[in-house]
Amino acid sequence: MNNYISSKGESDNRFLIEEFDIASLFGKKILEEIQEKVSRATGLAFVTVDYKGEPVTELTAFTSFCQLIRDQPGGEMVCRSSDAYGAIMAAVTQKTSVYFCPCGLLEVAIPIIIKGQYLGGFIGGQIRCDDAPAHICRLKNLQQHGIDYERSPETKSLFDAVTKMPYAQFLDIAEMVSMIITQVGEKELARLEVKQNIQLEKELFHKKEQLLKREKDLRNDELNILRAQINPHFLFNCLTTISNLAMIEDAPRTNEMTTMFAELLRANLSIAAKDRPLKEELNNVKRYLDIQKIRFGDKFDYTINRDFNEQEARIPSFILLPFVENAVINGIMPIKEKGYLKITVTENQEDLFITIEDNGKGKSGIRILTESHPEELFSENNLIQTIRDILKRLVDTYGSEYAVVIENKKGKGTCCRLTYPKDLRAKVG
């Protein structure tokens, strides 16, 4: 007989056997119910022990003889040692072990082994047997009982009253009990694995939720950083004071430029959402470019061509103006001839396209965004870092197909093409 509880295959969702004991696997109540049912069917007594040989269930159908022996001084210790011996032998051999207890009753120990881990044993028997083979272990030769039941009429009478059974019949019963314990063990193991898989799925779902929240927080942080870079609050108050002073001193151009810049800041400061109407964003860009026209005079000009639904089109906040500013500062400012900037907005069924073209030296695009050339930059590094952040944000949010395309034409200028979906929320990764 070599039936014992083991896994029928490696599970993808392994759990550590060491984390639970035999009572955790079956449950004390289930073990005692099994003992009761098997005992009624077979007439054998049963008890379940852990890997140390300690009982984890109440004794089931123990004979009056065994109860009396256990009640004697030192008797219970010897009986427990006998149970532990049987369980350990079964564990070592990984087979059902049959042996005689120190008092001469036939016992059986069925090891409970899960994935190679010995958890305990199912001990049963307390049967007299006269035809057992000579090789069956007799513990009275190894463990000396302090009680000589044969000399006491009471214990001798109780011993003689114990059921006698042929060895072959006892083996059949032991085989049947072993099969029952094996099936119950595998069922409980499967139940625990299902329970653990559900727990792992819950933990994985929770981790995904946390990851999505962190990604959302990071995007909000990036948006706040961009907003902070573009919108220094204290400047608005300063510009209002300067504008008032220009009016008092009768400086209309200074007042005009200051007023436009204040409106530009006000438009940016009012943005709290992740997106805004594209029409408003283009008006904001126009304010910036009008300021540059006052600054450079006849040396600079621009056009904004619009071909889109101005009532519905929206744009992610803070993605357009940095590219326009970069084209002016790093594209047009370095040249001696007149600078020209062209912005074109078109659409198709799903996407919006914004093209920013300048006639600079062809150095306002991808090269200075990917290489370090501080001597060529007329702006602070914050502008370039802002653009890098926008490039990354567009791809992270909408996918690689929405990467910004920047084409440098040496000596002829730079063309920058931004693409993003009309339905901003539908395509968010």
Image (cartoon, rainbow, N blue to C red):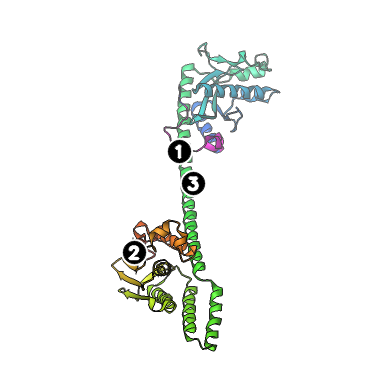
Residue 335 spot, x, y in % from top left: 39, 69
User: What residue lies at 56% left-to-right and 23% top-to-bottom?
Assistant: 88
Q: Which amino acid does label 2 sit on?
A: Gly
Q: How crowded is mark 3: few (under 14 residues within 10 Å), some or many (20 or more)?
A: few
Task: Magenta stretch: give its range.
Answer: 4-28
**Observer able to see residue 309:** no
Element on which disc 2 rests: loop
User: What residue lies at 54% left-to-right and 18% top-to-bottom?
Assistant: 99
Element on which disc 3 rests: helix
**Disc 1 vs disc 3: which is toward the camera?**
3
Q: Residue furthest left?
A: 348
Identify residue for label 1.
Answer: 190
The residues bearing labels 3 and 2 have C-alpha atoms spaced at a distance of: 63 Å
Quadrant of image for the C terminus: bottom left
Magenta span contains residue 41: no
Magenta span contains residue 9: yes
The residues bearing labels 2 and 1 have C-alpha atoms spaced at a distance of: 72 Å
Q: Which amino acid does label 3 sit on?
A: Gln
Identify residue for label 3.
Answer: 199
- Please identify the dominant SS of the magenta region: loop
Quadrant of image for the N terminus: top left
Identify residue for label 2.
Answer: 411
Residue 136 spot, x, y in % from top left: 53, 14
Do callouts 3 and 2 mark residues in contact (Cβ within 8 Å)?
no
Q: How crowded is mark 1: few (under 14 residues within 10 Å), some or many (20 or more)?
A: some
Element on which disc 1 rests: helix
Q: Is residue 409 above or below residue 176?
A: below
Q: What residue type is labelled 1?
A: Ala
